[in-house]
Amino acid sequence: MSTHTGNDRIRTVVEKAWSDPAFKAKLLKDPHAALKSLGMEVPAGITVRVHEDKPEERHYVLPMPLPSDLSDAQLESIAGGTTSTVTKGKKKSNPVSTPSIGVINQGGG
């Protein structure tokens, strides 16, 4: 299993899909096998679905709600993270005051 952060893994997968049409096709058809080929094992019982944005169609992923039994210290540790925006050839971090969520943006902004 890779020791990279979630955002690092997202960036790796997106960059590979953009540069390798065969990997992209595999990722869309069999995400578990495609991720495994990059050394990213998916735990048993987890389903991965990959959708490709198109000019006329966008996808938003709503994260699972946070458990209501988190302590103040636990809530503080996840609040105020950063998101990573991946665009062709660049990566930038944006400070936010919400839990960290990886954002993929193939377009201009």
Image: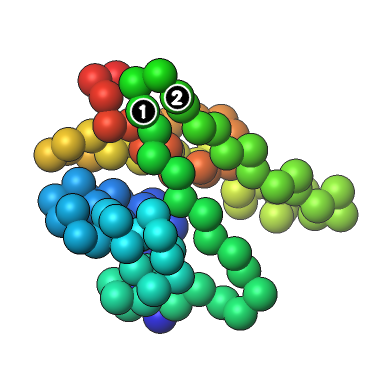
The correct choice, above or below, for 94 with respect to 84 in the image is above
Question: Closest to the observer: 83 or 56?
Answer: 56
* Circle 1: residue type: Lys
Q: How many marks?
A: 2
Give coordinates of residue 71: x percent, y percent.
80, 54
Which element type, helix, strand or loop, lies under badge 1?
loop
Q: Is residue 104 left or right of residue 101?
A: left
Badge 1 vs badge 2, beta-carbon distance below 8 Å? yes
Q: Residues within 10 Å of mark 2 (few under 14, many from 20)?
A: few
Using residue 80 as the reference point, say whether residue 32 is left or right of it.
left
Residue at figure coordinates x 39%, y 40% from the top left: 52
Image coordinates for residue 66, horizontal then vertical, percent: 75, 48
Name the residue at 45% across, 70% down.
Answer: 32
| Image side of residue 48 versus residue 16, left or right | right
User: Relative to 16, is 92 above or below?
Assistant: above
Question: Residue sitting at 52 percent across and 54 percent down?
Answer: 49
Q: Quadrant of the C terminus?
A: top left
Q: Which secondary structure lies at badge 2?
A: loop
Amino acid type, mark 2:
Glu
Question: Which residue has dot 2 on it?
Answer: 57
Which image quadrant is residue 33 in?
A: bottom left
| Residue name at image x 63 percent, y 38 percent | 62
Circle 1 crowding by C-alpha within 10 Å: few under 14, some 14–19, many from 20: few
Residue 1, percent from left and from top: 40, 80
Render colour scheme: rainbow
The label on residue 54 is: 1
On residue 86, which mark appears? none
